[in-house]
Image (cartoon, rainbow, N blue to C red):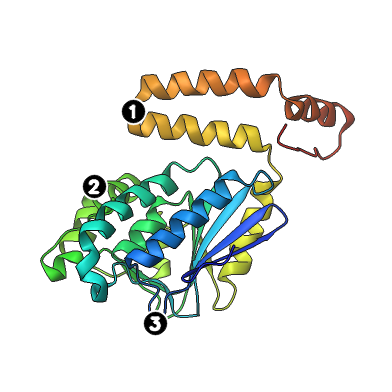
Amino acid sequence: MQLDNIQIEKKDHVAIVTINHPPANAWNLATMEDFKKALDDVEHDKDVRVMILTGAGEKCFSAGFDVSDAGNVAKTAPLGRELWRRVDRFPKPVIAAINGFALGGGLELALSCHFRVMVDTPKAKIGLTELNLGIIPGWGGTQRLSAIVGKAKALDMILFSKRIDAKEAFEIGLVNKISEAGKTLDDALELAAAIAKRPPLAVSAVLKAMSAGEYEGKDQGLAMESQGSDLVSTSKDAIEGFMSFMQKREPNFTGE
């Protein structure tokens, strides 16, 4: 698929989706629309089991909203909320490979991902800095940051527009892994490869159940868990899982 501001590369059940809107990979309406097309493509590609989101270049994951496209804010803002929510509820695992700074809407996108890998360099900082401009995080940041790091820490970061480095982000549970310079994507790919070996139907069922519980409440989450359990228990992957266990070999899950 050829897009102007988003690149897609697929290999070994993994799709790498790269934000390519220089100089700071900020989000204007055109980039949002490209991203929507990329999500459609990845979600419906049965061969893709894991998605990695990253930024082009070595300095920036994403700087958030593109202020030069302020004339389209009435369209961009609701679309950003919709797409970030879609990532949060994506039926396949999503890994943010944070290869540089991630601010505002850029960090809000990373917060929507299931896993976060971040480079450890002096200039790589992340934060929800909107209050410096007299506005607030508007693409899910107030909810997702507090859910990950707790209310007190989230308030401290948001109200004072703090920017933190990879080490602090790891200490507070905001990122899952710290990477050396130049190795962020490699580390994300290693994690993606490990996830891709897991049974795809079961992985998706877990994501859907947890998402339903978070968005619709525990009762709906339990109902979705029950549905997922019924689905996977009769799958070929379940048979393969039990057979490989009995035969003491590594399973080969196909997503059927």
What's the residue type where badge 3 is placed? Pro
In three-dimensional space, the C-alpha distance between marks 1 and 3, rounded to whole angstroms, equals 38 Å
Is residue 184 in sight in this rendering? yes
Residue at left offset 63%, top offset 54% = 192
Left or right, 146 with reference to 41: left
Residue at left offset 48%, top offset 23% = 224
Q: Give the mark nearest the N terminus, 1 or 3.
A: 3
Which residue in the protein does label 1 denote? 216
Work out which quarter of the rendered image holds the N terminus and state it: bottom right
Q: Is residue 131 above or below residue 144?
A: below
Disc 1 versus disc 2: nearer the observer: 1
Crowding near pointer 1: few (<14 within 10 Å), some, many (20+)? few
Which residue in the protein does label 3 denote? 23
Which residue in the protein does label 2 denote? 151
Task: Tell me residue 229's x, y (percent).
Answer: 59, 21
Residue at left offset 41%, top offset 54% = 173
Contact? badges 2 and 3 (CB < 8 Å): no
In three-dimensional space, the C-alpha distance between marks 2 and 3, rounded to whole angstroms, equals 33 Å
Element type at mark 2: helix
What's the residue type where badge 1 is placed? Glu
Element type at mark 3: loop
Disc 2 versus disc 3: nearer the observer: 3
Task: Tell me residue 193's x, y (percent).
Answer: 68, 54
> Which label sits on residue 241?
none
